[in-house]
Image: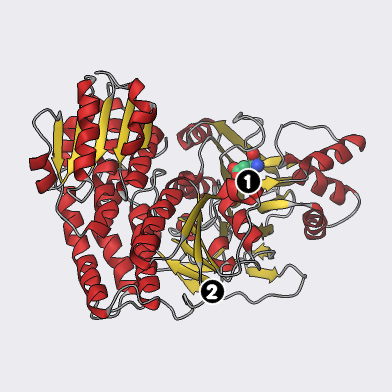
Amino acid sequence: MCGIVGILGNHEVAPILVEALRRLEYRGYDSAGIATLNEDGHLDRRRAVGKLVNLSDLLVREPLRGSAGIGHTRWATHGAPTEANAHPHRAGPVAVVHNGIIENYRALRAELAADGAEFATETDTETVALLTERHMAQGMGPVEAADATLRRLEGAFALLFLFEGAPDLMVAARRGSPLAIGWGEGEMFVGSDAIALAPMTDRITYLEEGDRAVVTRKGARIVDAEGRRANRPVRTIRAEAARIDKAGHKHFMSKEIAEQPRAIAAALDAWLSADGASLSLPDELDFAGVERVLLIGCGTAFYACLTAKYWFEQIAGLPAEVDIASEYRYREPPLGAGTLAVFVSQSGETADTLAALRHVAGRAARIVSVTNVAESSIAREADLDLQIHAGPEIGVASTKAFTCQLTVLLLMALRAAEARGALDRDALSDRLSALRALPAQITGALDIEAALQEAALRLAEARDVLFLGRGLMYPLALEGALKLKEISYIHAEAYASGELKHGPIALIDKTVPVVVMAPRDGIFDKTVSNMQEVMARGGQVLLITDAAGAEAAGDEVWRRIVVPTVHPMLTPILYAIPAQLLAYHTAVAKGTDVDQP
Ligand code: GLU
């Protein structure tokens, strides 16, 4: 994922492009660049490796003039993150920024090389610029040349073209990666998402799959994949949906952790009836004839899926399977006709998850997506999309999106239980009232921050950390370990507690802190036995538990972190808070770049 932006404006665009890129930096950030057209229609560009600040410093030393320009913040897929490989890519009169992958770039490169083209980069994107240049050299105008290029491309991309000598023109195209057009007064904008364009305009048109747009300062002319004129709606974006500030927090991650009571309440509001007493999920979420649920995601979303497997099985008695998106497609597992396939992705653009969805399309009974972006590719391609209502997540390490995904997946499992008669009216009503109490309990869990901050100082010194959990706490242990690895660069592993004796115990000594997540439930005593095994080898146990668990745990435990007692089905959502805070404060103690690991 990366971010692209383009502006046909009335003022100097370089600073505005950089500001827009800053708002897109959460999508990728190994290098960045902009290209502008000056008053004479002359094309020029600046690019810099590393964080965006390097590009803004360069622009101070070597400014770029002009009121038309495009910009890119890169997350390299083809070619190292060097200045030469940074976008915009240029060939003669054409500059291009690209989000995604041109899958047939090798063939195109070979063809261009045979034609005498010279390559200045290792990227797939450069082929787009070179092809377009070739088309123009053959006599085509800019729009026609870009069209001819687009017809040659395979893969997933959002592309934006700017042409020397054409200061009132951009060509934008969407296939697989998101792209939004922003409408101003005598100015037009293009960006990867509405967040990038928010300071300039709140009037947004989302391009649909296969669309391309010819943009001038007067407006945009959009055609669909078949080349027919397409009328896409202009929507007004709610201000809070596009606001990105840290609201007094040091990092977006800490702000987003703190936002969870509100975010979860928003997800519940959306999918419970007004009085909170019944589910208000759409009727299309129909479990009649469903024999099995298949849940697919990547990274944190995969752990949300793994948690949901326990819920579908335990609460609804419905068999559930979970797969990592990138594995599923190539494994070619048989797919029964009674399968409900659920795809979970915060952005709704995760390439592996989208590819897995396309692989399943037409073969599953129904495809449901659980995303945070209603206009995203995954949301559009699913039969039914359930929004998680987390609001924009800017920190790269997912926090509130995870707990909101869990909330929506739990509601789905409850709906399945209701439909299958696995829960009677009273039992469902008990569970819904427990859910309604959850946001307040999450607020309670946030109160333990100081205790975790102190424990994090010890974790920050460790080279390896183990996370243990049983049952519903096992996926959360995996998520806790992932979070710690991702932002603090400490090696962390998670195991189902019962697996400890089958090998991992060999790793334990006094240098390896062991984080155990265990509410006092029916399997708590087994977890206590596992902790004894750890402590017998000198391991330091950090136990995250409830009041009853803290009392029953014994004295040898190194640290006890006590969180509110919740309904057992809600423990994965509540215990996510200490897992996130622990990772956050460990990273802060180590001085790593929390929001952009
Ligand atoms: N494939 C292109 C590159 O590696 C674009 C990557 C991106 O989306 O940032 O430069």
Distance of label 1 from label 2 (alpha carbons): 27 Å
Disc ID at residue 234: 2
Count of numbered circles on the image: 2
Q: Position of residue 485 (x, y in %)?
A: 39, 33
Q: Nearer the viewer, residue 280 or 317?
A: 317
Please tell me whether mark 2 sits on a helix, a strand or a loop.
loop
> Could you say where residue 72 lies in the image, as x and y percent from the top left?
58, 44
- The image quadrant that residue 568 belongs to is bottom left
Is residue 38 visible to the viewer in this orientation of the structure? no
Q: Is residue 123 above or below residue 225?
A: above
* x, y percent for residue 570: 26, 58
The quarter of the image holding the C terminus is top left
Q: Can I make out residue 358 in this image?
A: yes
* Residue 161 horizontal/vertical position (percent): 69, 52
Location of mark 1 (residue)? 36
Callout 1 secondary element: strand
Q: Quadrant of ligand 1?
A: top right
- Colour scheme: secondary structure
Q: Is residue 432 left or right of residue 171?
A: left
* Image-based side of 447 in relation to 86, left or right: left
Mark positioned earlier in the residue sequence (1 or 2): 1
Residue 415, compared with residue 253, is above or below; it is: below
Amino acid type, callout 1: Thr
- Specify the quadrant of the image occupied by residue 179: bottom right
Q: Residue type at mark 2: give it.
A: Val
